[in-house]
Amino acid sequence: MKDTDIKTLLYAHFLCIFSVILSVLIPSFFVEDFSILDTHLTWLCFCSLFVTSINLVLYLVPKPNSSSKRSSLSHKVTRFLKCCVYFLVSCFSFHVIFVLYGAPLFELVLETFLFAVILSTFTTVPCLCLLGPNLKAWLRVFSKNGVTSIWENSLQITTISSFVGAWFGAFPIPLDWERPWQVWPISCTVGATFGYVAGLVISPLWIYWNRKQLTYKNN
């Protein structure tokens, strides 16, 4: 493992963090009275758009294709459609899980679905960009000793931290503080965002700290 690889990972993560910051700053120029609390659903859409765009640029554009089959238009279209299906399945799956864990079934449906979208953006989109629509690769990465690169190590950390952030974000909702940020699902989405950003910061530092102990097996 080279220090330059870790620096590249760090710079990529800074761009991802910057995309979250842009999702807060840029809409304020176009949306009247924009704020994370007052126009929460609008912010979720912008955040998902910015984060997804940065992930596409980081993982897909610079990635070389080694075979003519993979570089063909039909292969690219098929891969893109599969990724879209995976993302939609992820969104609907998270939505169902949220309802099973107590989210309103018939009320606030759009809010619940957009929470599922933003969580899928923080977890599923990086998996699709880095690993593609390949469930075997996903299972390998999230199994014990299954990673083969620092990027996959980082993917593990940011995905888990996003889930943990969303989980901790649910704790204040039933409390009787009557704060505007306790409305479903604001605290959960903000918690997921903080968890995602924390994972982006922690993962390069953790990899650098443990670089001598980390070994990767080639596929």
Image (spheres, helix red, strand yellow):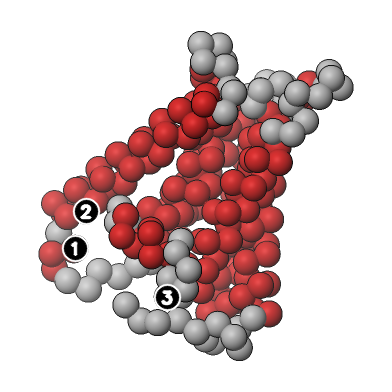
| Quadrant location, the C terminus | bottom left
Contact between marks 1 and 2 (CB within 8 A): the answer is: yes
Dot 2 corresponds to which residue? Answer: 76
Looking at the image, residue 72 sits to the left or right of residue 16; the answer is left
Which structural element holds mark 3?
loop
- How packed mark 2 is, by other alpha carbons closer than 10 Å (few <14, some 14-19, many 20 or more), is few
Image position, residue 106 (x, y; %)? 51, 11
> Which sits in the foreground, 187 or 142?
142
Between circles 3 and 1, the one closer to the viewer is 3
Q: Which mark is residue 71?
A: 1
- Three-letter code, disc 3: Thr
Q: Which mark is residue 165?
A: none
Dot 3 corresponds to which residue? Answer: 148
Give the mark nearest the N terminus, 1 or 2: 1
Which structural element holds mark 1?
helix
Looking at the image, residue 70 sits to the left or right of residue 160; the answer is left
Contact between marks 3 and 2 (CB within 8 A): the answer is: no
Q: Residue at x 58, y 77 (%)?
A: 6
> Which sits in the foreground, 151 or 99?
99
